Amino acid sequence: MAEILTPDICVIGAGSGGLSVAAAAAAFGVPVVLIEQGRMGGDCLNYGCVPSKALLAAAKHAVASRRVPPFGITQQRAEIDFAKVHAHVHGVIAAIAPNDSRERFAGLGVQVIEGAARFTDSRTVAVGDKFEIKARRFVIATGSSPAIPPIPGLAETPYLTNETVFDLKQCPEHLIIIGAGAVGLELAQAHRRLGAKVTVLEAAVPLAADDPECTAIVLEHLAREGVVIRSGVKVTRIGHTDGGIAAVIETSQGEETIEGSNLLIATGRRANVTRLELEKAGIKYDGAGISVGRGLKTTNSRVYAIGDVAGGHFTHAANEHAGIVIRNALFRLRARVNEDLIPRATFTEPELAHVGLTEVQARRRHKEIRVLRWPYHDNDRAQAERATEGHIKVVTAKNGRILGATIVGNQAGELITTWTLALSRGLNIRAMTGIVVPYPTLSEIGKRAAIGYFTPSLNNPRLRRLINFLRRFG
Ligand SMILES: Cc1cc2nc3c(=O)[nH]c(=O)nc-3n(C[C@H](O)[C@H](O)[C@H](O)COP(=O)(O)OP(=O)(O)OC[C@H]3O[C@@H](n4cnc5c(N)ncnc54)[C@H](O)[C@@H]3O)c2cc1C
């Protein structure tokens, strides 16, 4: 006989989104059940953000000797012990893991159940034959898994995904990566810097969602470091070679075979819906995940879906979704998601970060826009740090209302936050000219771009006449 539980909220999935909902609900004293079939912390902690950023951090140190000579410093070329890099990556995961652990959540008053959840009807979730949960509200936060493309030969060939690549204790000799999105390119740069030859194969355009003027700077940098990126090529077959793999690609010049030691698939994500038996609860979904409204309710009014399974792509999106569900489910508010206010960052070097509308999107939605830029090259701090690659690009409406910002360059992921705040408060670009920014900091690039909005008016004859008139008064 299954034990029947009747919490207020039942959360399925203990990744970024699910943990945030469970922690917040428990903090308000609400009875919560949290179900997790795998590792607490989900993708972000175990197979995503955390290990990838830890690997990139190691990779940055691996190439430090290249960047120090202009500072008057010489350094021996780095020796890389990949097994120790592996230990570093897993050490970082272990350091963060207690925050997401069963013990911590049990301590917060959350009942954590191990196992796979599935709906049995519109009001009930079962975990094996041990538990039946009849909650007031359910939150599906089951995340996503690597989408595996149907390439002939792939199923018979050993390949890596984000779930296995961080287990490598030996650096691949030649890593072939299929997919040039953020995940593919971050891992490409990390492995290249740690000693691998890297080839990235992309059927369309790398970093397709981002502004091409800014992505070009990332791609040029990666090419200079020796990452080979082949865009507009279709992988038609995967096969074995002695000790490696062969990817057959179709290019405009015909077929070509690329041989490598390891293959990594980074061709996007697939929502984790199959084990949930959503049909039994009347919850609609499609290839992009579970269908939700802006309040994150599914087609079953008792059930919300958040994070990757509801079309999110980032940990901070899952956290934002969690906050919205808490407001809606606990306080019956009408909180809504605004996708335009969710920033994104690619943590290559140079970093690429964006919030709001890109120039192309802004031109589609607005009759007239202004595009403002400022290069890192003209920033004193960037010069001092000898990191002058990149620029900020800000898009405003004709009246100066900020519509979006993209930053490519050092610390872009940090610098975008100011623009996210500006957008979320509906600020006009004038506000960005009025703030005092410490000198010398990279933040000045934003202020300088903002001042550019007023450059045309410097030549305004009426303004010049007014200044001349006022000068007469001493
Ligand atoms: C390599 C890589 C790097 C990334 N880097 C970044 C980054 O730098 N910044 C960023 O913001 N985002 C990054 N992401 C994306 C980020 O990891 C995800 O957006 C985030 O983890 C989504 O959180 P979630 O709660 O929706 O799902 P997840 O974190 O995936 O959690 C879902 C959980 O649900 C569990 N589950 C699934 N089905 C069931 C079931 N039926 N029953 C019980 N449990 C179930 C799973 O086991 C999992 O633990 C990266 C992703 C990858 C792959």
Image (cartoon, rainbow, N blue to C red):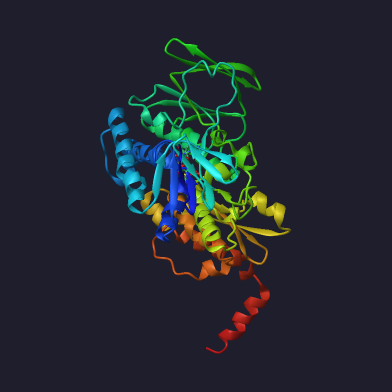
Residue situated in front as seen by the camera: 159 or 470 = 159
Q: Is residue 174 above or below residue 116?
A: above
Quick check: 361 left or right of 45?
Answer: right
Q: Give the residue at the far front of this rendering.
A: 1
Residue 166 seen by the camera: yes
Identified at 74% across, 58% down, the residue is: 367
Identified at 43% across, 61% down, the residue is: 28
Identified at 45% across, 30% down, the residue is: 226
Q: Is residue 195 above or below residue 352?
A: above
Residue situated in front as seen by the camera: 47 or 89 = 47
Q: Give the residue at the far bottom of this rendering.
A: 473
Total numbered badges shown on the rendered structure: 0
Residue 210: x and y in percent read 58, 45
Residue situated in front as seen by the camera: 250 or 243 = 243
Quick check: 368 left or right of 3?
Answer: right
Quick check: 374 left or right of 462?
Answer: left
Residue 78: x and y in percent read 28, 33
Residue 320: x and y in percent read 51, 54
Q: Is residue 414 above or below residue 149?
A: below
Q: Give the residue at the far right of this rendering.
A: 367
Quick check: 207 left or right of 465?
Answer: left
Q: Give the residue at the far top of this rendering.
A: 242
In which quadrant is the N terminus drawn? Answer: top left
